[in-house]
Each structure stands twice: as structure tokens, then as C-alpha cells.
Amino acid sequence: MSRFHFAKRPCSCACFVLFCLLMVISLLSPQAARCQDDGVFNRINGTRIKNSVFIYFDKDLTLYYSIDDEDITHKLDADMIFNIKNNHKNDFQVYFHFYNPLRTTVKSTQKNVEDPSYKAITDFIAKLPTGATKDASETKDKALPGDDKKMTEVKPSVILNQWILEFVTLIKPDAIVASEDLLKKYNAIADRINDIQTTEQFLFGELNIPSTGSTNRTVSGWVKLTASNLYKVDDDYTKFNDELTTAGNWKDVLAERDKDAKDKLKDVQKLLTSDFDALFTADLIPARLKEFKSYSTIFAKTLTTATQASFASQESLITQDSTLIKRLTDFAKDFSGVSVNGKIMHEGF
């Protein structure tokens, strides 16, 4: 059910308030535009209130209001000025029906500024990048085949393709299979090299979020789906918060995948530098071991530069996603626990 946003409006004189609220409601979707006339308030001369005015709308965006504790609701037509008498300290509280700020915006002539939530969210959607689409399968034919029974297969890699080609030319598979010690060393290398798939999947591929089933999407795809799902929620406080919870969970998963991708990249760099001597021994690589070590050290350093832009792009998406969720969460909190004379206004009038 709906909740109401509390806002205090200052009065300009001791016994009379001229309160002009211009509300323009519009959907972002050009194919389903809904709007009101330039004005929404019927002229109500000398309406006396004690504390509160409540404004809300139905599914067709027909506007209504009620005053204080009355059960009667009044339809708002097109004349825009609301004249109110108030016997207290010349202020009153305006409670507004919860609305989805991705679909609806509210403007007031008192401030004459666009709703900041609306602007921030529309800017966010407009700037969503497409995301990377490069696939590791591009280097499938260049992977090290290996023996399925004993040797761990080195999987195709976008990032490590050139290094793997060099590695393949130096090892002797027959000798590795024949030696338990060499096989152990080789498999330890292969396992760590294959972990780069985690990095490449995050940067260039599609990810699965377990709670969503078997669907895989790019980081950009998940962020866009988040915005789309939030946009589709109607003006229902509970449903909107439920969708925000889901969006937050998805964002946390993407952030974890980002961390995992960086950790796996660092481990490969460590393998090619500080861990090199422990695994890449002369009996595993009979020829050009010294040159290969020098090459691996240089190659490890290039990995940071090679992946920097892709990490920045994906992290920018996650940051935008996080910002959107935070702003919408803060927006929804304004409608939570609004109390009028001790009564929590969370289920309509």
C-alpha cells in the first residue's frame, strides 16, 4: 500500500496562506506518456485545516486530496490555486502519495526546480554504456590440449593467449606425463592459469547471479535489468522496496565478482613473477628457461595495463548501479513511518 511524504510549507502571513503547488506528472516512456494539465488543484476558497493536507492519485493518475482526519476525498481538477486558512502557526504539513521516481516526477512552483531524484535517475539511464562483448572462444584453437586423464587442460584465454603459446612451445608433454613430479608441477601451473577465466568472464563475458536461475548477462546487462525492473514497479511502496532489496543483492554479487576478478589476475601475475622459480624448473622447461622467466616477468606487468580500461568500465557501471540504488533507497525512506497525530500513515487514507 502507499505511504506519504511529509513536507512543511512556510506561510506568508498571520492568518492566511496562499499555497500554490504545481505538480506535473509524466512518465519517462515516450510510448506510454501520461500527464496532467498544467494545473491540478481546484480553487478552494477559505478551506480551513488544522494540520495536514493529503494528496494522492489513482492508477489513472487522477488526483485527489483530503484534509486532516476526514474520510472524504476530493477530486482535483484543473484550476491550480489552493487557498487555505490555518489557525495555528501559519504552517501545515503536506503528505504526498508514494510514487516511483523512475516513472514519475513532481515539480513545485515554490522551488521551481526539477525533482533531483528524477534528474539523477534519468541521467543514470542515459549514460549506461554497452559493455564489453569480447569472448574467450576467439582463442579456442590456441589452447594447450593436454591429456584428459592426467594433464590439466589449459583453457583458452584472451588475456594470456600469447603467454600460453610461448609456454606450449617450451614444455614436453610426453616427459610430463611420464613423471609424477613434473605432472604435479605442470598441473599446479595449469590450475592457476585457468583461474584467469574468472577475470575474463567478468571483463568480457557473461555472469550468472545464482538467485536468478540460469540466465547469464554481462555486467552492463545486469545493471540495465536492475534499472528496468525498478522502472516497471508501479506506485506501490512495498513492491518498490522489495525490488530495491533485489537490486541491492545483485549489486553486491557484481561487486564480489569484481573483487574475485582482480584477485585471480593478481595471482596469475604472482605466478609469473615471485612464484616462477618454485614451479617453472629446468626439468619442466628444458630449453630457454632463463629467457622465459624474463619474458614472463615483463608479460605479468603488461597485464595491469591490458585490463585497466576494462576494469574501469565495469566498475563504473557498478558504481552507477550503487548510486541509483542508494538514491532510490533514500527517496523511499522519506515515505516510511510518517505519523499524523500518532497514526502511521502507510496504508492510504
Image (cartoon, helix red, strand yellow):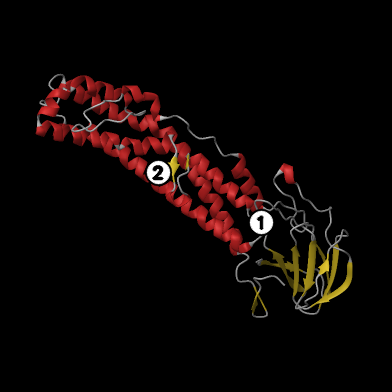
Q: Nearer the viewer, residue 249 or 37?
A: 249
Crowding at dot 1, Cα within 10 Å, few <14 / some 14-19 / many 20+, comes out as: some
Q: Give the secondary structure at mark 1.
A: loop
Q: Nearer the viewer, residue 170 or 154?
A: 154
Q: Give the secondary structure at mark 2.
A: helix
User: What is the quadrant of the C terminus in the image?
Assistant: bottom right
For badge 2, the amino acid type reads Asp
Dot 1 and dot 2 residues touching (CB under 8 Å): no
Q: Please say whether residue 274 is visible from this viewpoint.
A: no
Vertical arrangement, residue 244 with respect to residue 267, above or below? below
Residue 255: give x, y in percent of width and height.
42, 47
Residue 254: give x, y in percent of width and height.
44, 46
Residue 2: give x, y in percent of width and height.
66, 66
Residue pointed to by mark 1: 234
Q: Please say whether residue 138 is visible from this viewpoint.
A: yes
Vertical arrangement, residue 109 with respect to residue 52, above or below? above
Crowding at dot 2, Cα within 10 Å, few <14 / some 14-19 / many 20+, comes out as: many
User: What is the quadrant of the N terminus in the image?
Assistant: bottom right
Residue pointed to by mark 2: 258
